[in-house]
Amino acid sequence: MAEPVPVSQPQSSAPVNEDELVRGARRGDLKAYDELVKRYQERIYATLYHMTSNHEDANDLAQESFIKAFQALKSFKGGSSFYTWLYRIAVNKTINFLKQRKNRTHMSLDNLDFNAEHDPDLMALISEQTPRRAAGLTELQEKLNEALMKLSESHRLVVVMHDVQGLSHEEIAEAVDCNVGTVRSRLFYARQQLQGYLADYLKPT
Amino acid sequence: MNENENNFESLRRLLALKRHETPPPGYFENFSAEVAARLRAGEGGAAERPAIELPWLFRLLSAFEAKPAFAGGFAFALCLLLLLGIVYAERPDVALQPLLRTAQVSSPLAMATPGDLSSPPAAQPGFISSTNPIFNTPSTPSWFVDSQPAIAQQVSFTLPGN
């Protein structure tokens, strides 16, 4: 009889198959679930942060999403990937949260990393706004987040997933549970709205 | 679509700024530990799971959370069922007649006095054959259906002049 595969392995060994981790977590193995959390925490947090523009809210929602997913693992049938299923839980939780929060928008933005100051595209955008680069980037960050928060949740989600996180239309359609045409039209509308809000910061094409 | 993509190129470059927003240093090193701690503290831990697991209930609740319209439809169906139940319960001719007949036959008082069998207790005025509140329902007013037959009484007035 084959020995059970250990789910927590040293980092030097080959990565454990996701299906094995899901099976382990379903049996209540917290080590296996911990590995799944580590795998997807950054992507889930990033989506929730870009949706809320608030670090504390994103942190709470991300933790609750992982806890909820663990509780509901028995209902995960494997029809989609674990990540898509987890993503759906996180997105639904966030949309419900934002609907309850409504107009009580309080931004708590993460800091920009070092690379932002060396991004030629961003430098080109702010060069005409202000001679001080750091101040220019921070201002641009605030305006961008304000503009995103003016969009509806469904439109913001599509822009975040496509233009910020780089997901394809098909991947978004699967995660949001709608068809590709809807994703495309939402993306077009959301970009048009954003272009209007951020006209002062965009170069004419 | 390509033309649209070109129109939004400047916007997409600006949106790239969002990718440079990062949480405080060390945040992700502690994140999974915090989730694990909450799970061990009882939020979904295996030890805290109920003895009887109901996977269908989990699926139902997940479906409610994913599709609020489904939850609304389910709630509407429940309300409709409740309303129908109340309406049918208020109609004694449908639901109570068989019960009444059974209760009259098996009434303990009637059995205790076999000599009175010729006149059923329920037929005697003011006699309550059972403590079962069902027997009192005909005298209580109904919200939906007026089950009491209207009683017509003759009234005569004597005018003072006559």
Image (spheres, rainbow, N blue to C red):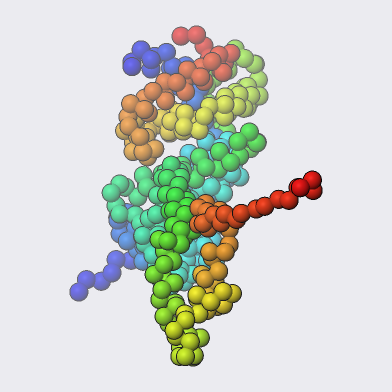
Q: Residue furthest front?
A: B162
- Residue drawn at the location 51% of the way across and 70% of the way down: B134
Any part of residue A21 in sight: no
x and y percentages locating residue A60 in the rendered image: 57, 49
Location of residue A103 (image quadrant):
top right
The foreground one among A134 and B126 is: B126
Count of all numbered marks drawn on residues in the image = 0
User: Going by the image, does B159 lie left or right of B79?
Assistant: right
User: Looking at the image, is A64 positioned above or below residue B48?
Assistant: above
Any part of residue A20 in sight: yes
Q: Residue furthest top?
A: A204
The foreground one among A92 and A171 is: A92
User: Going by the image, does A143 lie left or right of B12?
Assistant: right
The foreground one among B109 and A110 is: B109
Could you tell me which quadrant the N terminus of chain A lies in? bottom left
- Residue drawn at the location 49% of the way across and 45% of the way down: A93
x and y percentages locating residue A140 in the rendered image: 60, 23
- Residue drawn at the location 36% of the way across and 60% of the way down: B56
x and y percentages locating residue B78 in the rendered image: 44, 52
User: Looking at the image, is B147 positioned above or below residue A28?
Assistant: above
Q: Residue furthest left?
A: A1
The foreground one among B81 and A85 is: B81
- Residue drawn at the location 50% of the way across and 8% of the way down: A204
x and y percentages locating residue A12 in the rendered image: 36, 56
